[in-house]
Amino acid sequence: MFFAKGEIQMRGIAHYFMLAAVVAVTLGMIWGMQMAASEDHTMRSAHAHLNLVGWVTMAIFAVYYHLVPEAGARPLARIHLGVAVVGVVLMVPGIAMANSGGSPGVAIAGSLVSLASMLIFLATVVIQGRQR
């Protein structure tokens, strides 16, 4: 074994970002399997956003906050988590609604909230870079 038990643990905000990422990828996998089984891929763009923004982006946030725990200890990190989760929760169903002929309003709102999340992350990285 490379690491002693308990030597590497993801804690705090990093853990919550990783939890959100794993929930997103699990839902994305189930949704992808359902689309494959039904041979109906009309929701592929919503599925792709769930996997990319929900899984990949949240996991990258988790790794960053794990590697830079000082950034994760700042109040801005908790705001970032909330904004990021709300962005995915709005964007993915919003895209699905728009794909079904509904208004794109929720998708647009979710996209803007997700952009705000990325801008918060940009600010976090810049602020932390200046601290070192």
Image (cartoon, rainbow, N blue to C red):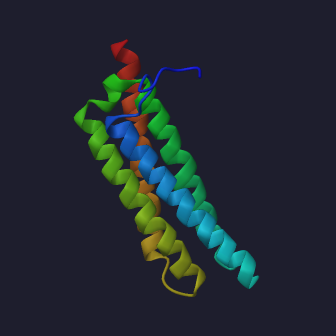
Looking at the image, the residue that sits furthest to the right is 39
Looking at the image, the residue that sits furthest to the bottom is 101
Q: In this image, 128 relative to 35: left or right? A: left
Q: What is the tally of numbered marks visible in this picture?
A: 0
Above or below residue 66? Residue 4 is: above
Looking at the image, the residue that sits furthest to the left is 75
Above or below residue 110? Residue 11 is: above
Asked whether the viewer can see residue 106, the reply is: yes
Q: Quadrant of residue 99?
A: bottom right
Q: Quadrant of residue 47?
A: bottom right
Residue 78 coordinates in the image, percent (x, y)? 28, 42
Q: Residue at x 37, y 12 (%)?
A: 132
Q: In this image, 47 relative to 104: left or right? A: right
Q: Quadrant of residue 41?
A: bottom right
Q: Residue at x 66, y 77 (%)?
A: 34
Q: Residue at x 68, y 72 (%)?
A: 33
Asked whether the viewer can see residue 120, the reply is: no
Above or below residue 103? Residue 13 is: above
Give the quadrant of the N terminus: top right
Q: In this image, 123 relative to 108: left or right? A: left
